[in-house]
Image (cartoon, rainbow, N blue to C red):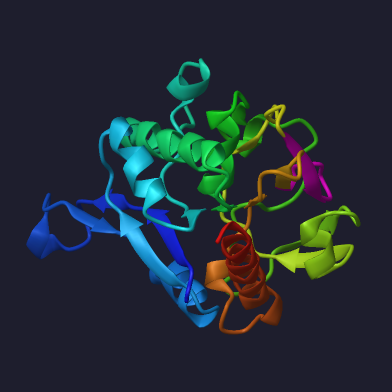
Amino acid sequence: MKPVIGIPGNILTNFSPRYTSLPITYRPHGFIEGLQTAGALPVVFPISKEEDAKHYVESVDAVLLAGGQDVSPLTYGEEPHIKLQDTSLIRDQFEIAVIKEAWTQNKPVLAICRGLQIFNVAFGGTLYQDVSLIPDLNLQHVQESTPETAAHSITIENDSWLGQLYGAKALVNSYHHQAIKQLATNLRPVAWSNDGLIEAFESKDDQHITLGVQWHPELMIHNSEAAQGLFNAYVKTVRDWKNNQD
């Protein structure tokens, strides 16, 4: 059977002048297509009460955390910097509950861009609220080129799951103005940009299957075998994990 992957959703209120302020629960289609092409059944969780997270996570085989607004600094004990952009505290709180439930239930998690950031915060990590606050920054992390175009290279740890997939180097796109500052203690960094930002992490232990990436593979799936390959490998990992549970 195809594995079912739950994706916490977002709420859009300004997608069309004709429907101003009409809330729409959604997920960008690249995440859906990447998972479907890989042989999974994606389902979207609407933003809900924190206590509902347990039931949502129980209903799926794994979780994918997608991009979106900035993570509110209130979730990691900081005041908002002047360069902070749009946030959704209700989304942050629900996703943190989903993350902790997925961890408790030992269900695989793929965290992309904001997903990487909120996963880190859920377990005590912190963020740079804007990449301009990072010393010695010298790369363009909010690229001006088209989304399917690689923006910079990353270096990958050889003994990581990601390293087995990509090798020691990879080219990725980049659309983030926040970044990991302090990494949560249950995670290990496995990829870095040339100016030192953490571009990917995995869980430290073998019990939890967790991968977080700072780039957007869902925007590159049509012209990058490696991008779709990430979804393929993740879904295969989920399928293998599911079979071992049965």
Image x and y of residue 153, in percent:
79, 61
Query: Which residue occupies 26% across, 34% down?
Result: 49
Q: What secondary structure is the stretch in magenta mostly built from?
A: strand
> Furthest-left residue in view?
18
Picture quadrant of residue 151? bottom right
* Left or right: 111 in relation to 209: left
Image x and y of residue 3, in percent:
48, 69
Picture quadrant of residue 149? bottom right
On the question of residue 232 being in view, the answer is yes
Query: Which residue occupies 24% across, 55% down?
Result: 25
Nearer to us in this view, 84 or 112: 112
Q: How many labels does the image show?
A: 0
Image x and y of residue 167, in percent:
86, 67
On the question of residue 27 being in view, the answer is no
Nearer to us in this view, 209 or 20: 209
Q: Is residue 45 above or below residue 36?
A: above
Which quadrant: the C terminus?
bottom right
* Left or right: 105 in relation to 59: right
Nearer to us in this view, 92 or 78: 92
> Furthest-front residue in view?
246
Q: Is residue 226 above or below residue 142?
A: below
Q: Give the range drawn in magenta.
A: 187-200
Query: Which residue occupies 34% across, 48% down?
Result: 56
Q: Is residue 146 magenta?
A: no
Image x and y of residue 76, in percent:
52, 21
Query: Which residue occupies 60% across, 35% down?
Result: 120
